Image: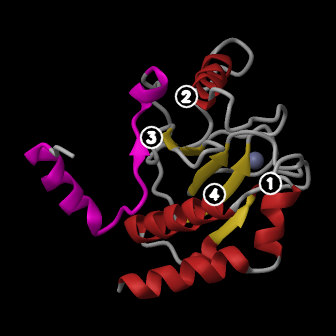
Amino acid sequence: MFIPKQSVAQSKSMKKVDTVKVLPKSEWKGVAGRPYKQHVPVKITVHHEGGKLLTINDDARQRLKNIQTWGMGPDRKWADVPYHLLIAPDGTVLEGRNPLTVGETNTEYDPTGHLLICFLGNYNQQKLDDKLLKVLTDLLADQCMKYGISPKEISTHRDHSTQTTCPGDDIYSYFANGYIVKQVTKKLKKRQ
Ligand SMILES: [Zn+2]
């Protein structure tokens, strides 16, 4: 495979922090966000989109574009998509809102200081597979390193709100049994 010089340099500098490639907004034809409250992430919260199921055969990019169009429209008037990073059912990770701006929520918790990672689809009905679990734990380890966040500060939406079952029963089960935090801790130790 031909690799242009520039991307070799980029991937070298990326290596220190990022093991998961995050595809830019242009991949899903996202528009730039509007200016919004700034923050620095000090914890990470995992979500699912909820609502409609999304399979590997569905168009995750179009789904995300629709979320943005709806969220920035008259219904919500948000500055951008509510989440900072989004994971498609095939394990592709897509860029959302600028991580240095506060996310959005329909529930009672204050998302200030939370980096919001969201699985597209509904994990009350669908299930994580080994690939998605690996993408999630790698991505969480990347973000912990990037912002100096302890794996102990990783949780889910329902840990902060009584108004939701987000991130769905299947994703939540891997938090309830401690699997996610344990895996991320292990990965971070290996990277030191
Ligand atoms: Zn949520």
Give the distance between the C-alpha atoms of the residues marked 2 and 1, in whole angstroms: 27 Å
Residue 127: numbered disc: 1
Give the distance between the C-alpha atoms of the residues marked 4 and 3, in whole angstroms: 23 Å
Q: Is residue 103 magenta?
A: no
Image vertical order of residue 109 relative to residue 153, above or below: above
Instruction: Name the residue nearer the viewer: 116 or 10.
Output: 10
Say left or right for 54 vs 28: right
Q: Where in the figure is residue 91, as x and y percent of width and height?
A: 57, 49
Q: Residue at x 61, y 17 (%)?
A: 69
Q: Residue at x 68, y 32 (%)?
A: 57
Read off the magenta span: 4-31
Q: Residue beneath label 2, please? A: 80
**How many marks can you see?**
4
Which of the 4 quarters of the picture holds residue 192?
Answer: bottom left
Whether residue 112 is visible: no
Q: Residue beneath label 4, please? A: 132
Q: Residue beneath label 3, please? A: 98
Task: Identify which amino acid the numbered label 3 is placed on.
Answer: Asn
Which of the 4 quarters of the picture holds residue 51?
Answer: top right
Instruction: Name the residue nearer the viewer: 36 or 177.
Output: 177
